[in-house]
Image: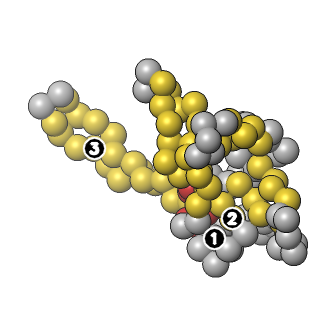
């Protein structure tokens, strides 16, 4: 049996096939660093707008790989660490009035 560690900073609700909500509380937050590059100004029919690009950086100390432990992280974190098979994301968002309330499953990148 795997231990789930939720590092999203908020609870994750997974609605199983029987319609039951399984609530996985946040136990911390795994954040990544980023810098923003200024790419100049673009002229549009709405006026001149700033154009920027965020550049995301891996952190030096990600959560340790441990047998039997799976980490729920943001999609961005999982994409920055594609070699980490222990990083899971939410899949199949369920929304109510446009607001995410649950997901159908956990997945990998």
Mark 3 near mark 1, Cβ–Cβ under 8 Å?
no
What x and y, as percent, mark residue 24?
A: 77, 42
Quadrant, the C terminus: bottom right
What x and y, as percent, mark residue 32?
A: 67, 55
- Seen in the picture, residue 71 relative to 65 is either above or below; the reply is above
What x and y, as percent, mark residue 26?
A: 79, 41
Mark 3 near mark 2, Cβ–Cβ under 8 Å?
no
Q: Earlier in the sequence, mark 3 or mark 1?
A: 3
Can you see residue 33? Answer: no
- At x 12%, y 31%, the residue is 45
- Report helix, strand or loop for mark 3: strand
Which residue appears farthest toward the front when viewing the image? 18
Mark 1 is surrounded, within 10 Å at the Cα level, by few (under 14), some (14 to 19) or many (20 or more) other residues, namely some
Look at mark 1 in the image and give the residue it sits on. Answer: 81
Which is more toward the observer, 103 or 21? Answer: 21
Q: Is residue 61 left or right of residue 45?
A: right
Q: CA distance from mark 1 to mark 2?
A: 8 Å
Task: Name the front one of labels 3 and 2.
Answer: 2
- At x 44%, y 21%, the residue is 97
Q: Earlier in the sequence, mark 1 or mark 2?
A: 1
Q: Is residue 39 left or right of residue 13?
A: left
Which is more toward the observer, 31 or 41? Answer: 31
Mark 2 is surrounded, within 10 Å at the Cα level, by few (under 14), some (14 to 19) or many (20 or more) other residues, namely many
Look at mark 3 in the image and give the residue it sits on. Answer: 41
Which residue appears farthest toward the bottom when viewing the image? 83
Numbered tag placed on residue 18 in the rendering: none
Numbered tag placed on residue 87 in the rendering: 2
Q: CA distance from mark 3 to mark 1?
A: 32 Å
Q: CA distance from mark 3 to mark 2?
A: 37 Å
Q: Earlier in the sequence, mark 3 or mark 2?
A: 3
- Seen in the picture, residue 23 relative to 78 is either above or below; the reply is above
């Amino acid at each position: 049996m795997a231990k789930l560690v939720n590092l999203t900073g908020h609870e994750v609700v997974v609605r199983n096939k029987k319609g039951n909500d399984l609530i996985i509380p946040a136990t911390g937050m795994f954040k990544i660093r980023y810098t923003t590059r200024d790419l100049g100004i673009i002229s549009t029919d709405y006026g001149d707008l700033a154009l920027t690009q965020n550049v995301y950086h891996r952190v030096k100390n990600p959560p340790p790989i441990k047998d039997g432990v799976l980490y729920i992280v943001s999609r961005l974190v999982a994409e920055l660490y594609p070699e980490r098979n222990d990083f899971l994301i939410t899949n199949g968002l369920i929304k109510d009035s446009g607001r995410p309330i649950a997901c159908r499953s956990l997945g990998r990148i």
